[in-house]
Every structure is written in structure tokens, then in C-alpha cells.
Amino acid sequence: MESRQSYFEKKQERFQELCQRMLAERRLIVASNRGPVDYTVAPDGSLSAQRAAGGLVVALSPVSRFIPLTWVAAAMSEGDRRLAEESGGPTRVPLPEQEIYLRFVVVPRSVYQRFYSVFCNPLLWFIQHYMWNTPRTPSIARPVYEAWEQGYVRVNEAFAQAVVEEASGNKRTPFIFLHDYHLYLAAAGIREALPDAPILHFTHIPWPGPRYWSILPEFMRREIHEKICSADIVSFQTMRDVRDFLVCCEEFLKGVTVDHRACTVARDEWITRVTYYPISIDAAGLCQFAVSPEVQHYEESLSQLRREITIVRVDRAEPSKNILRGFRAYDNLLDRYPGLHRRVVFLAFLVPSRSEVSIYRAYARDLLELAETINGKYGDDEWQPIHVFYEENYAQAVAAMRFYDVLLVNPLIDGMNLVAKEGPLVNTRDGVLILSEMAGAHEQLGEYALSVCPTDLEGTVRALASAITMPVEEKRRRATALRRAVQEEDITFWMQRQFRDLMAVSRRRH
Ligand code: G6P
């Protein structure tokens, strides 16, 4: 059988060839709120760059290894602002083997604050993850109107302008690849200046149905749906999102024709194609990293905590990840099966996130408290049933994913959830994946996982018990199938499909 390495090498070669064909047609400009690196100002006043947290930089790294790309991103930190001021134009980012030219979008701090901390997170994020407690929140009061007018609209205009500037001076207008909920209005501004640009917008998070979108005032939701349709391709993680988007367009936009079979939205001569590309991971890169000395070091240090059965979870400390219910399910399991005491341990790797939003701070506090309660209830000097690692340490999390017996991924709703793909790829124990039906990854992997409805606490307890008692053969069958699915549909697959579709748009525009 072909080795994993040569399988990946062949795949990379095919991908490299596609990237080069693409570049021969047009250059590529990527735009997203967070860029590939964050700059910080050290106490001595010097600037230093760190690779940004988040999946997009990982997702695009196989591309930027093969072709140069320009990345337009917001200057989020003081360091970013300073770099933008000092450089006066795009700078090559200091990431090894990658050719990325970063162009920062700089807007006044108050504008950015309204955009990021009032409109995008929480308002849009909470709508798109069904997280509002609608009898009480949100209230779309004047600050939200201001955040729209003086934040969201202005930042999107500034992004459109920066992309247009970066695109100018090329013989052919570049391919433009826009990302996520921060930039729903940008395609329209770009289209006005560059009518022939092939534009693709990819939304990483779920798209709710029209009733839930109606939390937003009519003019805001209409403008979002209208302007995103200026892209040639509007894309999502799953078919479910595509269906909901089409229904939303039908309800919110006048004068458009929505074709649910062809998945298009047409207005006059303009046709927007709506599709899905499930995002994935850099499988080749992760397999290499998983056997690196850094990961091995953590595998050794964590080995002291392991028990006969190790349950693992890895998440941002984010309310939509449903971490509290996951802990409660474990509490119920220990209560019901005393025979498991001392034989099982739960390791939770939680990355601090968005601490500027009070709901996130409260959530992080509650889950640390609940873990303590569980330890107080069942633990003793020799055994702590649950260990929470509340820190950003990717190598440590990968180390734990190598040896889990059960991986619990139970988000309330999630665009994709890459942990559900990383875990099975690096795991060496034929561990069982428990996966929420509401994670985008469920469309691809649900068949080989134990599915749970995320609010179903009892169902989650039973899934944990079944995972623990699953026969070895059955575990192996599922783990092998999961690994194969992730390897086949890795990040190059995600990019390939988008590149091909963008090239088809480009050719029609010849
Ligand atoms: C998650 C989501 C992305 C989103 C990002 C924003 O990773 O999956 O879709 O862009 O959060 O996080 P940030 O820290 O950049 O605000």
C-alpha cells in the first residue's frame, strides 16, 4: 500500500500545478479581518510578528508556498497600526517558505471598535450561532445603529477600497477571495470599481434561516444579502447553509429569482452561484507536526495524567462549543458508573477567547468552576477526574489528540469544527469520535462518529458509555474510515474546488 507520505506528496504536486495554472491567469488577493500575522510592540518599542491564531492562515499556507498572494487584513493591534504607518504599503510577512504580501486596512480606532466589538462579535456571531436569549437580548438600540453606520459599513468600504487599490496595475484583474462575517458588504464596493473581477465570498460560520435573521432590522439584513450577492460565488461550509441562504434571499430581496435546484440567485443579467466547500486541515503538515519533538515532549508530560480510558476535548472557550454540557455529561457518567472511577480521565484543552465580551468571561469562569466541582465530588489525592488546560498551546492539544480513547466534539452549532478532523487524523489508539449533529463536519464524518444532539445531555452520557465499551474491531473500522475521509478531503481539496470554480468564472469573462 502507498505510504502516507507519498500519498501526500502526489496530492501536493497536483495542487501545486493547479495553483500555478491559476496564477498564470490572474493573481490572487485574499481579504479577511484577521491577517496571517499579528504585530506587537515590545517594551523596548520594537515590533515583533506572531503567526495569527485561526484556521485561515493554516488553510492558505499550502497556497502561499506555491504562489505569491496579497492578503488584505484589518490593522487590529497597535503593532499592526504601526507597521502599516511605517511601511506605507504591503509588507512581506515573516513566515518561512511563504510568499504573502500583507496590506493593512487602517480605520480610526472608534470605527474598528464598533465594527468588531459591537457589530461582528457579538451581534452577527450570536445570530449566526443562534446564541441570543431573545426574550431579553439583543436590543437593537442606537449604539447598534451607530455600529452599523459608523463601524460595519465603513470598515467594509475601507476593505473594498484597499482591495481595489491592490488589484489595480495588473494586466488582468486578480481573483478576489473574501472571508467571513466581517466582510459581507465588501464584494459590492469591489464590483462597482472592478466589474470583471472574479469574486468568491466564503462564510466560515453557519447561516441561519430567515426567521432568525429577522433579529436584525430589515434594512441591515437586506443589505447584507444584497451586497454579498455581488460576488460571483457565495459559498458556505455545508449544503444546509446553502439552503438557508437561498431561502433568505427569496424572503429578503425583491426582484430576484432564486433557483433552488441550480442554487443561484439572479437579478437582471447578474447571476450569483451559491455553493459549499467544506473547509479542512493541512493533513500533510499536521501529520508531520504530530511526530515533531515539540509534540512528543507534551505527549510525555501528559502521559502521567492518562488512565485506561482518556476522554479529550479541544476548543476555544466559546459558549457555542457547549463545553458546560460536555462536563455535565461526564459528571452524570461518573455518577452512574462508579466502576469507571480511577479508570477514566477527562482532559480539556480550552483556548481563552474574546475576553473583551462579558458573556465569554462569564462562560470561562463557569466552566472552570464546574470542573472544580466535579473534581471535588469524585476525586481524591490519587485521581482527579478532570483536568482543564486553559491556555493557548496547540502542540499540547495535538499531543493529547494522539492518545485519546474518546474525543468529545459537541458544539451547539459550528460552521465546520476542525478538531473533529484533526483528532482522527493524528490519533493512534483508534479512538472514538463523539460528534454533534450541529457541527458542519457532521455532513462528512457523521457516519463514522457517534452522533449526539448537543442539548441532549442524556444522549451524550449514553454516547460516552457506548464509546468506552465499543468493541475493538468496531472502533478500528470507524477510526480507519474517519482518517481516510479527512486525508482525502483535506485543505488542498477545499482550495482546489474553489480555484476551479473561480477559473471557470474567469474564463467566461474572457
Ligand atoms: C473562529 C471562526 C472564524 C472567525 C474567527 C474570528 O475561528 O471559525 O470563522 O473568523 O473565529 O475570530 P477572531 O479571534 O479573529 O475574532
Image (cartoon, rainbow, N blue to C red):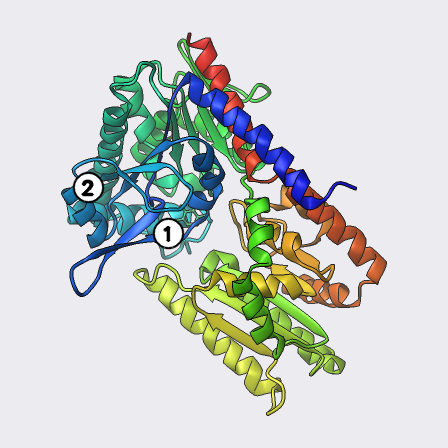
Horizontal and vertical percent for residue 467?
74, 63
Badge 2 amino acid: Val
Q: Earlier in the sequence, mark 1 or mark 2?
A: 1
| Residue 444 or residue 289, whichever sits in front | 289
Pick whichever, 207 or 24, lies toward us. Answer: 24
Does residue 87 appear in the picture of this structure?
Answer: yes
Establish if 186 lies above or below 109: above
> How far is disc 1 from disc 2 in space, using C-alphas?
20 Å
Q: Is residue 280 left or right of residue 168?
A: right
The residue at which mark 2 appears reads as 106
Local crowd at mark 2 within 10 Å, few (<14), some, or many (≥20)?
Answer: many
Q: Which quadrant of the structure image shows residue 259?
A: top right
| Quarter placement of the C terminus | top left
Q: Position of residue 484 (x, y in %)?
A: 71, 44
Residue depicted at 38% across the width and 68% down the height: 362
- Dot label at residue 51: 1
